[in-house]
Image: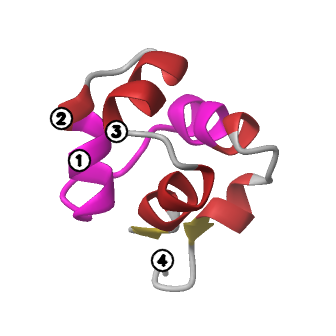
Amino acid sequence: MKSKIKALRKQHRISQDELAEAVDVTRQTITSLECEKYTASLVLAYKIARYFHLTIEEVFDFSEIQ
């Protein structure tokens, strides 16, 4: 699933480590999300969106889900 996580991180000038710590996952999880190798759980998607003060739909692209 595509996301705007990397762009949001860069816009807010935070590292993968900082985001990972804020949402209670590993840096590898953030890397996997950014590379589209992992799909976030609903809880993780919510935490990431909330961290950036956005909705889940503003962070994650659901257009390819059928």
Residue at the spot 26% in from the left edge and 64% down from the top edge? 36
Label tally:
4
**What's the amino acid at mark 4?**
Ile
Residue type marked 1: Thr
* Disc 4 to disc 2, C-alpha distance: 24 Å
Q: Which residue does the image show at 52% across and 32% down from the upper left?
A: 44
Residue at 38%, 68% in the rendered image: 1
Q: Which residue, given by chain and number where applicable, does mark 2 sit on?
A: 28
Dot 4 corresponds to which residue?
65
* 1 and 3 marks in contact (CB < 8 Å): yes
Of badges 1 and 3, the one in the foreground is 3
Mark 4 or 1: the one toward you = 1
Q: In the current view of this chain or complex, which residue is farthest to the front?
A: 13
Residue that mark 1 sits on: 31
Q: Main secondary structure of the magenta part?
A: helix
**Where does the image place residue 9, in percent across and percent down from the top left?**
50, 52
Residue 16's disc number: 3
Q: Is residue 35 left or right of residue 50?
A: left
Sequence order check: which comes first, mark 4 or mark 3?
3
Vertical position of residue 64 compared to residue 29: above or below: below
Ranked by sequence position, the earlier of labels 4 and 2 is 2
**Image location (x, y in percent) of residue 17:** 33, 28
Magenta part of the chain: 29-48
| Mark whose residue sits in front, 4 or 3 | 3
Q: Are the two marked residues, 2 and 3, in contact with CB atoms closer than 8 angstroms?
A: no
The amino acid type of the residue labelled 3 equals Gln
**Residue type (three-letter) at the residue carrying disc 2:** Gln
Q: Is residue 10 toward the left or the right of residue 54 in the image?
A: left
